[in-house]
């Protein structure tokens, strides 16, 4: 079951990445398709675990909000950042946004420190949620 879920997650991000790349390079209409596809993703993960405070749902909502904000012309560069981040997720299983979200006060029970930040962003990529992979301080 884990591999099916993981493959589905990879599939979602790979399709999103392709839509974004085509949207910024060939046809901006694909950016709207990326947004629509991510709305489906948000609803799907909410349906799997019907809680907005579920970490997977939070990451997808944050990603969707970034997509929407990037439609504002002065913030178009956000699409490029999302392409970089999504490509890193697809090719290397490293999700910067998930790591950032894991530091939010509602997701983190550890004391906020420079060590926590370093461990969060510089630890190896993980399968599954990065939220559970950050070691507790000793």
Image: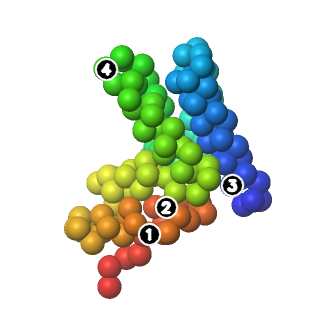
Label 2: few (<14), some or many (≥20) within 10 Å? Answer: many
- Which quarter of the rendering shows the C terminus? bottom left
In the picture of the structure, the residue carrying the numbered disc 4 is 74
Q: Earlier in the sequence, mark 1 or mark 4?
A: 4
Picture residue at 54% right of the left edge, 16% below the top: 28
Picture residue at 72% right of the left edge, 60% below the top: 2
* Image-quadrant location for residue 6: bottom right
Mark whose residue sits in front, 2 or 1:
1
In the picture of the structure, the residue carrying the numbered disc 1 is 123
Mark whose residue sits in front, 4 or 3:
4
Q: Earlier in the sequence, mark 2 or mark 1?
A: 1
The percent coordinates of residue 69 (x first, y second) are 38, 24
Q: Are marks 2 and 1 in contact (CB under 8 Å)?
A: yes
Q: Earlier in the sequence, mark 4 or mark 3?
A: 3
In the picture of the structure, the residue carrying the numbered disc 3 is 6
Judge by depth and name the residue closer to the eye, 56 or 94.
Answer: 94
Secondary structure of residue under mark 3:
helix
Label 1: few (<14), some or many (≥20) within 10 Å? Answer: some
Picture residue at 49% right of the left edge, 61% below the top: 130
């Amino acid at each position: 079951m884990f591999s099916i879920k993981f493959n589905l997650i990879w599939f979602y991000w790979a399709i999103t990445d392709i839509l974004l790349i085509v949207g910024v390079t060939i046809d901006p209409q694909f950016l709207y398709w990326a947004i629509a596809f991510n709305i489906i993703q948000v609803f799907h993960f909410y349906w799997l675990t019907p809680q907005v405070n579920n970490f997977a749902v939070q990451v997808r909502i944050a990603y969707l909000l970034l997509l929407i904000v990037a439609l504002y012309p002065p913030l178009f560069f956000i699409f490029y950042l999302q392409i970089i981040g999504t490509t890193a997720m697809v090719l290397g299983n490293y999700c910067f946004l998930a790591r950032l979200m894991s530091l939010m006060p509602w997701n983190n029970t550890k004391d906020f420190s420079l060590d926590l930040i370093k461990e969060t962003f510089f630890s190896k990529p993980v399968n599954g949620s990065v939220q559970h992979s950050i070691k507790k301080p000793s």
